[in-house]
Amino acid sequence: MIKPSAWRWTMGSNNNVIQFENYFRPSAAYRRVLLEFMDKVAESSEDFFQISLNLAINGKWREWNESMPIGSTLNFSEDMLLDTGDEFVTHAMVLSIELGDLAEKIRSGLASGERFFRRD
């Protein structure tokens, strides 16, 4: 168990209830591992997006893909891939989105300079 280095308390609205929440200060090693985790999560998000695209152009979009001239450029959106009607493309895109959101949550927490992380 990690020993807390800080306790945060909040006075209740009737000024007689105190709620203690357990927080800990992450070590440099924790932050380093968290950064590595964030990088892997972000990379995995990109991988799942690519998997979704590959599934779509080799499945539901195969005929369209084969009819496109070589060298054509198209920007694919999350919504386009979520709307293919292929459940596996959808599952891969949901994973991509969720992992992207998680990476951004970690990035935001680190960028905001949060000193303490709540232990749930």
Image: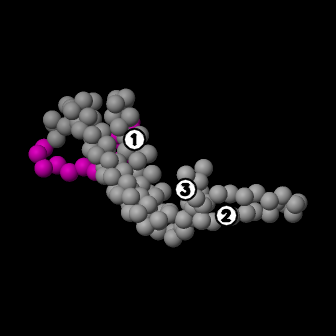
Where is residue 69? Give x, y as percent.
13, 44
Question: Disc 2 or disc 1, which is closer to the eye?
Answer: 2
Residue 72: say if magenta.
Answer: yes
- Residue nearest the observer in this picture, 68 or 6: 6
Question: Disc 2 or disc 3, which is closer to the eye?
Answer: 3
Disc 2 to disc 1: CB gap under 8 Å: no
Mark 1 or mark 3, earlier in chain: 3
The residue that appears at 60% across and 61% down in the rendered structure is: 4
Whether residue 61 can be seen here? no
Q: Would you name the residue on which mark 2 appears?
A: 7
Q: Would you name the residue on which mark 1 appears?
A: 95
**Residue type at tag 3:** Ile
The residue that appears at 34% across and 48% down in the rendered structure is: 45
- Residue nearest the observer in this picture, 58 or 43: 43
Q: Would you name the residue on which mark 3 appears?
A: 2
Residue 79: say if magenta.
Answer: yes
**Residue type at tag 1:** Leu
* Real-space Cα separation, disc 2 to disc 3, in angstroms: 13 Å
The magenta-colored residue range is 69-83
Question: Disc 1 or disc 3, which is closer to the eye?
Answer: 3
